[in-house]
Amino acid sequence: MIIIKYLKGYKRYLTVGFISGMISSVILSFIPKVYSKIIEYLINDKIENLQDHLLLYFVLTISCNIFAGIRGCIFMINIEYIIDRMKRDILSNYFKKDLIYYNDKNLNEVGNILTTDAKNIADIYLLNSNVFIRDLAQFITITYILGQESFLLYVITILISLSLVIVEDIYFKVIYEKTIDKTNTLLVKQNSIINDYINKIETYRSLHLENIINDMWLNLNTSYIRMKNRDSICYGINLLLTQTVNEISITLLIFIGLFLEYSTSSILIFVLYFNYISSIIKDFNGIQKCIIKNKLSIKNVTDFISNNDSNDNLSDNEASYIPNNYFNPNIEIKNLTFSYDNKKNVINNLNLIIEHNKITGITGHSGKGKSTLLKLILGFYTKQIKTGQILFDNVNLKYIDKIYFYDKLVSYVGQEPVLYQGSIKKNIIGNLHEYDKELYKKLLFLINDFYDDSNDDSNYDSNSNDSNDDKNVKLSGGQKQRICICRAILRKPKILLLDEPTSALDIENEIKILDLIEELSISYKMTIILISHNKQVLSKCNDVIIL
Ligand SMILES: Nc1ncnc2c1ncn2[C@@H]1O[C@H](COP(=O)(O)OP(=O)(O)OP(=O)(O)O)[C@@H](O)[C@H]1O
Ligand SMILES: [Mg+2]
C-alpha cells in the first residue's frame, strides 16, 4: 500500500485519532438506548426518573462530540502533512522523468497526479479507514446492546437494512449513475469545445469557423438538456425511493416486532437504532465504491513514484563525470541512430564532428531531424538512442554530471521561444546568483526597443487572464525570441545551441544577433551550433552541415 511509506512519524497521532473516533462511536451507540428510556418515561409520566437519564443523555452527547472533535482535528491536520509528504515525492519525480515519459501522455492527467490523485489517495486510505474503524466500533457496540434485547430481532434488523441498501444501490448503479455519467460527459465535451475555441480564437476567427462551433455546441446542448431532464426524473425517483424504502423498512420492522410479541420498549429501541445500522452498512458500501472509483488514482501515483518498472528515469550515479574548467570539447556524433517511438528512425546512422570555438550551422529540409539532433546533444531522449553515441571529447554525454552539464556546459534556445512566469529580467537572469554585468548590458542592446532595465516592473505570465494586472506584459514572437537568446547567452555556456534563433526577427535585429554570436564565439571561446534555413545566417557559420 503506497500510503504506508508516508505515514512514518504520524502513526502515533493517527492512532490517537483512531482511538478518539472509536471512543466517540462507542458513546454514540449508547445514546439511542438512553433516548428510548427518556421517551418511555415521558410517555408513562415517570418524571421523577427523567432527571438522571436527561443528565446521562447530556453527558454522553457532549463527550461523544468532544472525542469526535479531537478525532476530526487530528485527522485534518495529519492528513495535510501526509499529503504534503506524498506531493513532495511526486514533485521530485516530475524533475527526474526522462522527456520521453511526457511525450505520449495527456499532460493534464500527468499534472493531476500531483493534485487530484495525491489527494484522492489520502482520502481513499485515511478517511476511509477512519470511517471504517469508527463504524466498526459502533457496529460492535450496537450488536452488544441490541443482542441483549433480542438477537433474533437484531438479525432481522440487519437483514432489512441490508436489503434497503441493496435496493438503493441497484437503482443507483443500474439507472441513476449512468445518467449522471452521460450528463457529465456532455458537459465536459461542451467545455472542451469552447475552451478550444478560446485558445485558438485567432485561427478559428480567421477561418470563420464560428458556425461550426455553434452547431457542435448546440447539438451537444440538445442532448445535454434531454439527459438533464432524465437526470432530474431519476433524482426525483431516487429521493422517493430512498425515503419510501426507509419508511417501509421501519414499518416492517415494527410489524415483525409485534408479530413476534416483543415489548413496545424493545421495538422502540430497534426503531431508534435502525437508521444507525443502515447508515453503517451504507458507509461500508461507500468505502468499497470509493476504492473502486479511485483505483485509477492509486495506479497513477504508484506508477509515477515507483521507478523500478520503468526506463523513464535518469540514473544519477552513472552520470557523475565533472570535467575541469578548461574543458572545451569537440562534439562527435558517432553512428547515431535514433527513434522517438522505436518505429520510424528520425536519425539514421549519423556521423559528424562539431569543432569547438566555431559556429556550426545545421540546415536541411523540414522534418529531417535538425531539432531532434540538438535535443540529443542536449542530453534529452538519451534512452531512445538505438545505436551510436554522442561524445564530448571522447566522454559519452550520458556519463557527464547533469548539474554541471546544464549549469556550465550547454545553453539552448528552442524553436518555439518559451518564457516562464515572472519579469523580463527574471526571465533573462533565471537562477544565476552571479552574472557578468558587462555581458548583461551588452545583451540589453538586443531588447532595448521594448525593454527598459532601469524601470522593470514587468510581469510575464502566458496563463494569466487577469486583464486588471497591468504589469502583465504581452510580447511578440520576435521579442520573446530575443529574450530567450539573452537568457541563453548570459549563462556563458561553453556550447550554445540555437534552433532557428532569428526566424521571427527583422533584418536589423537579425544582424545585431549574428554580430553578437560572432563576437561570442571569438571572445568567449563559445562553441555555437545553430539551425537555420536562412542563407544570411548560414554565411556567418564556419561549417555548415546539411541533414
Ligand atoms: N516529441 C516527438 N515525438 C515523436 N516524434 C517527434 C517528436 N518531435 C519530432 N518528432 C518527429 O521527428 C521528425 C523530425 O522532427 P524535427 O523537429 O527534428 O525536424 P526538423 O528538422 O527540426 O524540422 P523543421 O525544420 O520543420 O523544424 C519529424 O518527423 C517529427 O514528426
Ligand atoms: Mg526544427
Image: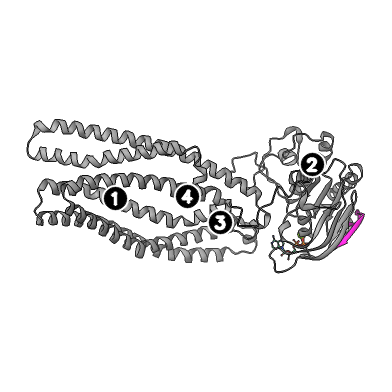
- Under mark 2, the amino acid is Arg
Cβ of mark 2 under 8 A from ligand 2: no
| Mark 2 vs mark 1, CA separation in Å | 64 Å
The quarter of the displayed image where residue 66 is located: top left
Q: Earlier in the sequence, mark 3 or mark 4?
A: 4
Tell me if mark 1 has few (under 14), some (14-19) or many (20+) residues whose alpha carbon lies within 10 angstroms of its own: some
- Residue 169: numbered disc: none
Residue at the image point whose x is 88% and y is 57% from the top:
353
In the picture of the structure, the residue carrying the numbered disc 3 is 195
Residue lying farthest to the bottom in this orientation: 343
Q: Earlier in the sequence, mark 1 or mark 3?
A: 3
- Under mark 1, the amino acid is Ser
Residue at the image point whose x is 34% and y is 55% from the top:
285
Asked whether, in this view, residue 131 is left or right of residue 207, the answer is left
Q: Which residues are magenta?
A: 538-547
Residue 530, horizontal then vertical, whole percent: 83, 54
Q: Nearer the viewer, residue 325 or 546?
A: 325
Dot 2: what SS? Answer: loop
- Residue 120: numbered disc: 4
In the picture of the structure, the residue carrying the numbered disc 2 is 491
Q: Is residue 41 visible?
A: yes
Dot 1: what SS? Answer: helix
- Under mark 3, the amino acid is Asn
| Mark 1 vs mark 4, CA separation in Å | 23 Å
- Under mark 4, the amino acid is Asn
Tell me if mark 3 has few (under 14), some (14-19) or many (20+) residues whose alpha carbon lies within 10 angstroms of its own: few
